[in-house]
Image: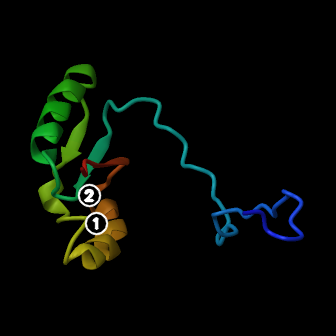
């Protein structure tokens, strides 16, 4: 049944809110992973323990000087301790001399 007074035109409503924070430029990419220290961050979901192991083997074959800081050093990035883990993360990355991080998995 038609709505009285409606000519078939409707206001457009955008489902997203206005941007709340200013965007920042991304950090520059590393030229190479050789000689770099890579942090492995994981949310303990799926099979990150296996995936990181396979990835380390593949990346070490390609970049023999790459070094990894295992995900066990950082704790779970999702769950009951995530706030503490993430709050400590910047200092932990600095303490380990991390050049880049891989935050991975999930389902």
Residue nearer the viewer, 8 or 80: 8
> What separation in Å lies between label 2 and label 1 (alpha carbons)?
6 Å
Packing grade of label 1 (10 A; few <14, some 14-19, many >=20) is some
Q: Position of residue 71 (x, y in %)?
A: 17, 54
Determine which residue is flagged by label 2: 96
Q: Position of residue 23 (x, y in %)?
A: 65, 60
Who's the residue at 32% across and 52% down the image? 98
Secondary structure category for the residue under label 2 = helix
Q: Is residue 80 above or below residue 65?
A: below
Who's the residue at 34% across and 76% down the image? 87
Secondary structure category for the residue under label 1 = helix
Q: Is residue 10 above or below residue 79?
A: above
Packing grade of label 2 (10 A; few <14, some 14-19, many >=20) is some
Q: Position of residue 103 (x, y in %)?
A: 31, 51
Position of residue 14 in the picture relative to residue 63 (left or right):
right
Determine which residue is flagged by label 1: 92
Which numbered marker is on residue 58?
none
Position of residue 104 in the picture relative to residue 50 (left or right):
right
Give the quarter of the image for residue 37. Answer: top left
């Amino acid at each position: 049944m038609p709505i009285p007074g409606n000519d078939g035109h409707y206001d457009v409503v955008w489902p997203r809110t206005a941007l709340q924070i200013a965007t920042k430029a991304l950090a520059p990419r590393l030229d190479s992973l050789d000689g770099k220290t890579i942090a492995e961050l994981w949310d303990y979901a799926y099979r990150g323990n296996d995936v990181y192991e396979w990835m380390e083997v593949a990346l070490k074959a390609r970049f023999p000087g790459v070094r990894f800081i295992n995900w066990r050093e950082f704790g779970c990035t999702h769950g009951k301790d995530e706030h503490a883990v993430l709050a400590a993360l910047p200092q932990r990355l600095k303490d380990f001399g991390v050049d880049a991080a891989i935050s991975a998995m999930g389902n």
